[in-house]
Amino acid sequence: MKARIPKHREFVIDFPKEVPQAQADEGWAELNAIVEAYKKAHDGQSVFEPTFIEDCEPAVKELQKKYGFNYQIKEFK
């Protein structure tokens, strides 16, 4: 069986070790809320949508300021 998986981009999030675990957990919960809100606003579309990064990056940047994580956008093939 063959499956064609399209190229896509993802946020790669990293919480530094100096960020307390409780703060990191709270940050992850808010990041997941962004994904869930995106799905609801886009009729259940997933993070594999072509505009997901552009649509969500401003919110991710705001959370980055609040929680101190690092992120990069990585392309997968």
Image (spheres, rainbow, N blue to C red):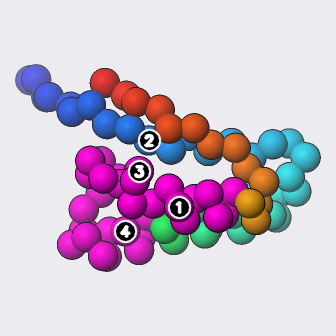
Return the disc, 2 or 3, that comes first in the chain's sequence. 2
Residue occupied by mark 2: 10
Question: Splitting the image into 4 quarters, where does residue 37 fall?
Answer: bottom left
Quadrant in the picture for the C terminus: top left
Return the disc, 1 or 4, that comes first in the chain's sequence. 4
- The residue positioned 76% from the left and 65% from the top of the image is 66
Number of numbered discs on residues: 4
Distance from label 2 to label 3 (Cα)? 7 Å
Q: Residues within 10 Å of mark 2 (few under 14, many from 20)?
A: some
Q: Secondary structure at mark 2?
A: strand
Question: Splitting the image into 4 quarters, where does residue 29 fall?
Answer: bottom right
Eye-nearest disc, 3 or 1: 1
- Residue nearest the observer in this picture, 31 or 25: 31
Principal secondary structure, stretch drawn in magenta: helix
Where residue 25 appears, x then y in whole percent? 72, 62
The label number, if any, that marks residue 58 in the structure image: 1
The three-letter amino acid code for the residue at tag 2 is Glu
- Magenta range: 35-64
Residue occupied by mark 4: 38
The three-letter amino acid code for the residue at tag 3 is Ile
Distance from label 2 to label 4 (Cα)? 14 Å
The label number, if any, that marks residue 5 in the structure image: none
- The residue positioned 49% from the left and 68% from the top of the image is 34
Quadrant in the picture for the N terminus: top left
- Residues at discs 1 and 2 in contact (Cβ within 8 Å): no
Q: Secondary structure at mark 1?
A: helix
